Each structure stands twice: as structure tokens, then as C-alpha cells.
Image: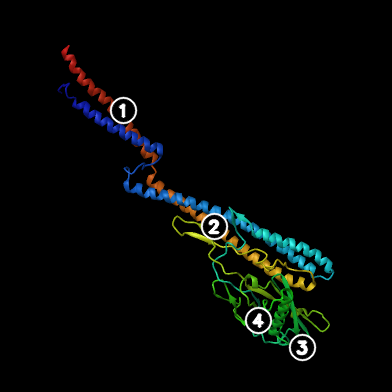
Amino acid sequence: MSLTIRYNHEAILMHRTMSENQAALQKSSEKVASAQRVTGAADDVSGYAISERMRGMIRDLAQDVRNTQNGNSLLKVAEGAVADTVDILRIMQSKAIEAANDTNDDEDRAVIQKEYNQYIDQIDDNARVTFNGKTLTDGSKNREGSATRTSLTNNMLSSDTTELTTFTDMKNRQGENLGIVENDTVEISYVKQGETVTANVLGKDNMTKLIEAANHAATAEEMLKTKLNGRAFDTEILSGKTVGKDTAGIEVSTVDGKNAITIRAEEEGVSGQIGGVAVKVLDSEANIKKNATETLNAFIETVRAEDASDDNDLIIHTGPKANQNLRMYMTDMRSYALGLRGKDGNTLSIGTRTEANAAIQTVTNALQKALNEQTRLGSYHYRLDYTKANLTIAGENVEASDNTIRGIDFASQMVDHTKHKILAQSSTVMLAQSNNNASDVLTLLQ
């Protein structure tokens, strides 16, 4: 072996090797410390790009989970307000039943009326509930749609009953005659704009006559109060499978698909709604004919009156891409929209037995509206729960995939780390040895 001083090739070679081993040791230490196989694009160009996209998706999915949690919080506020309204309406229903009992006189009913008015005011307070400054159930978050008219349908009368069938010929769904005779009195009461309208005809008449009498009574009362001409309280009677149209303009049919009698408001929107219909049959001695009354009194709301509305849905964004969302709308839960108060401020009256009976039906319809709203809000709540669970699982799976790309096998990496550490140490020793070889030349000069 030659001994030189001017050019130490062996030392230069050992220095390069040592630098490479130390760089490899540093990279190995970085991977062990970060628990990542890919710490930069240089480690795995395509894997790094895929991983970065996955990490963006993981962050997006985490935000979507927070969105659903916030949406559920909003729904809980709305649900709480509607649930309180449901409780109030149940109390109002029992109070109306109490007022319909003649163990109470009109003074007693006046006392109950004061309590009634407070309940109605509280329903309006409930409807104005807010979340982060947004009012929820006051009609401001309704879906897009056209105005609708109240439809109240009787599914207990025979399917061959029409608006021209006389009461004496009317039968129930089982084909049994109702037992109404010509001199019986058929009385109808309904509520509109907080006012109770009452009219009656004889058993020899038909539903068209009864509705015309109610319209006339309503018009006369309205003219007496406002001194205005016109028939602002008109309703109509129709028979068939179609009971009206919903906010989308789609025809609504009877539940069983058979013909039925429907009382429908002629005026569109909430201002024209009919709060509830009560019908009773009295014999010549003013005794109620229970079987006939039960059948004729079975009008239930099949189309709710709503005002035309723009698209005011609430949007809960639930996905990492644009327009992945859940659209939620909330119907108007104010007393006015529930038929408990008129636009002039009149509240539902239970001041007389007749008014109390009409109020029972009106509150029953209002309660059904509130229950429908409560059910729909609950379905949104469950939908968001399932969405949250799905987003959480998706996030976990994407994170697992990212870990597959970036994560290290600790056992294998520790073997490499130990190897690089030994090589770094040995190359340092060999560099020192190569430098010593050059110093040995100097001994020849001694």
C-alpha cells in the first residue's frame, strides 16, 4: 500500500460514505420519530400526493361531522318549542271539553277563556324561538310552494255519498243508514279567523244546503262586524277521490282511494283556513242522535292551508363536495297558522257550548298539525344522526387508508435504523483510521 500526504483518496472516500450513512440515519430517525414512512414528496411522489388529498378529505369530513352536530343542536331547539306547543294544545283540548259541559255557565267559560288566551299567547312565543339569531318555527323557514286551501274530509260516510245526497239517505262506510229523518236538525259549526260560524238545516236537505247556510251565516256576521259587502268566509263542498292540492300543486287523494265528502275553503292561504268543523244531528226534541253525529262529525284535515312561500329551507352541509346537504324546512307554528287566532287578533272562543264544541275540533286539527311538525323534525334529527355516523365511519376509513400510505412498520424501520446507526459509527471510525494512515508518513521523516 502506498503512503501519500498530498491526496488522501481513502479519507475522501470514507468521508463520503460517512456522510451518506449519517444522512440515512437522520432520515431513519425522522421516520421513527414521526411514525411515518412518507415525510415528504421525495419519499414517495405518488403516495405523497394521494395522502395529501386524503388528509384534505379527512379535514372536510371532520367539519361535516361538526356541521351535523350543530344541525342537531338547532333541531333540538325547534323540537323543544314544538313539543311545548303540543303540551299546551293538549291542555287546551281538555279545557274546551270542560267548557262544552253544561255544568259550567257562561261566566265559568269566560274564566276558562282568559286561561285560553294565555295559552295562545304562549304558543306564539314558542313559535318565535331562535337559534344563533335565526327564528325557526314562525313560518320564516318554510319550503318553496304555492298557496293551499284547507280541506276537511269525511271518510266515514258511504263512498257513494255526494254533496247532493240528502241527510235522510246518508249511510256510513258499512252501508248502514244513519237514521236521520226529515224533521231532524243538522247543525254545523266551524272556526275561521278566530270566529265561530254556526248554521243548521233540516234532515231533508243535503250538504250543499248546509254549507250554503254556513256561508250565509258567516257573511252576515262579517258584514255586521265590518259593514263590508262580499262573502269572505265562503267554503265549498265536493265529493270524489281528490280532496285538494298540496304546495307543489300535486293533487291529494283520500287515504283509501275511495270517494269521500270534503269541505274546502274557497280562499287560499292561512287567512282563508277553516280551523275545524263540528257537525251534530238533533231530533225534534233537541236530543243528539249519537250514531249520525259521530259519522257526520268525522271531518279530518287532509290538506293544510299554507301561504305561498319562497325557498327558505335551512341547509345543513353534510359532505366534502359542493351541494352535498340536507334541506330542512319548518312550518308555521304560530297561533294564526294553527287556526287559533284571527289576523285581527281574535282568539279562539269557548264562551258558549256551541263555540266550545267547535273549539274542540279546531284544537284537534291544530294538535295534529303540531304533531306532524314534531314528527318531521324528529325525522330530520334521526337523519342527521345517521349522517353523522356515516361521516365518522368514512373519516375513519380514509384515515386508515392514509395511514397505510404514510405509516411505517416499526419493526422493519428499527432494523434499518440500527443498521444505519452502526454504519454511521463504523464509517466515522474508518475515516479516523484513514487520516491516521496519512500521519504515518510523517514518521518516516523522523
- Label disc, if present, on residue 314 of the rendered structure: none
Q: Which residue is mark 2?
A: 384
Circle on res. 237: 4
Q: Residue at x 71, y 64 (%)?
A: 89
Q: In the rendered structure, are the residues bearing label 3 and label 1 in contact, judged by CB atoms less than 8 Å apart?
A: no
The mark lying in front, picked from 4 and 2, is 4
Q: Residues within 10 Å of mark 3 (few under 14, many from 20)?
A: some
The residue located at (82%, 84%) in the rendering is 284
Coordinates of residue 26 in the picture (x, y in percent): 34, 34
Distance between the Cα atoms at labels 2 and 3? 58 Å
Crowding at dot 1, Cα within 10 Å, few <14 / some 14-19 / many 20+, comes out as some
Measured Cα–Cα span from mark 3 to mark 1: 117 Å
Q: Residue furthest front?
A: 227
Residue under pointer 1: 425
Mark 4 touches mark 2? (CB < 8 Å): no
Disc 1 residue type (three-letter) = Gln
Color style of the picture: rainbow
Q: Which residue has dot 3 on it? A: 182
The answer to whether 387 appears left or right of 301 in the picture is left
Q: Position of residue 182 (x, y in %)?
A: 77, 88
